[in-house]
Amino acid sequence: MSEYPSLQMTLRNRQAAGQGLVAALQKYSRRPDVIVLALPRGGVPVAWEVARALEVRMDLMLVRKLGVPGHEELAMGAIATGGIRILNQDVLRNHHIDDAALQAVVLRETQELLRREHAYRGARPAPDLHGQVVILIDDGLATGASMHAAVQATRLQHPARIVVAVPLAPQETVDTLSFEVDELICPITPLWFVSIGNGYADFTQTSDEEVIELLQRAWQRPCESGAP
């Protein structure tokens, strides 16, 4: 049985997933040194529910998975804002990915990361994470490559504490990632993990428009930090 009873083994949607994480994060409520960073796109509606309930700031951590050509759902690595690049050497070797193929994927995903940066943030500067408690949120983890990149990008800014909060992930990924952060919250670790989407009744793709709308609401909402 889950430690967090508000989260069922099949999540209704991303909003319900975010609401189910709140209880485990209550100690960070209304603290001016706490900021929730969502991994777009799917992590944004999850993070919005958490940030709204805790009354803390919310922003983005832009990350792009590097999918294996022809098997894009399988991550051979990830990139993140700040020039961070994580590679899974086992996947690269097992799928015979040469440097040219890898660089083509890196170039494409870098362009998409920059597009999202412009579309979502516009001229708004990225938040200063120095000395902050950073809660990184996504709608789930599979290999964890994207979150690994997000953690490394966050650590470059010398935060006081890095917390990862996700609704579900395989136990192996949770165990590996837990060594990289100060706290990891993951209520659901299925015995037979198939995919993130398999854990949701509604896993409709989050649109750019939804991301922008929720960010604007977060940035306009007053909170205890006094941030805009």
Image (tube, rainbow, N blue to C red):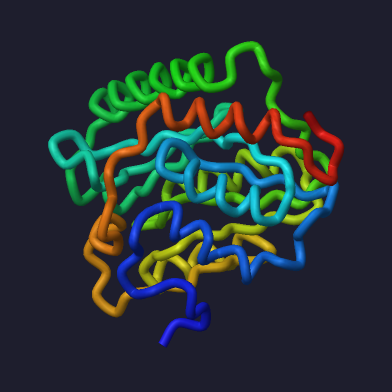
Percent coordinates x, y for residue 142 in the rendering: 34, 57
Drawn side of residue 117 relative to residue 94, left or right: right
User: Against 210, is 44 above or below?
Assistant: below
The residue positioned farthest toward the top in the image shown:
123
Residue at position x 20%, y 51% in the image: 94
Count the marks: how many?
Answer: 0
Drawn side of residue 149 relative to residue 161, left or right: left
Asked whether 146 or 115 is in front, the reply is 115
Asked whether 75 or 1 is in front, the reply is 1
Residue at position x 60%, y 44% in the image: 152
Residue at position x 59%, y 50% in the image: 136
Asked whether 196 or 86 is in front, the reply is 196
Percent coordinates x, y for residue 116 in the rendering: 46, 21
The C terminus lies in quadrant = top right
Q: Quadrant of residue 17?
A: bottom left
User: Against 114, is 139 above or below?
Assistant: below
User: Against 147, is 157 above or below?
Assistant: above
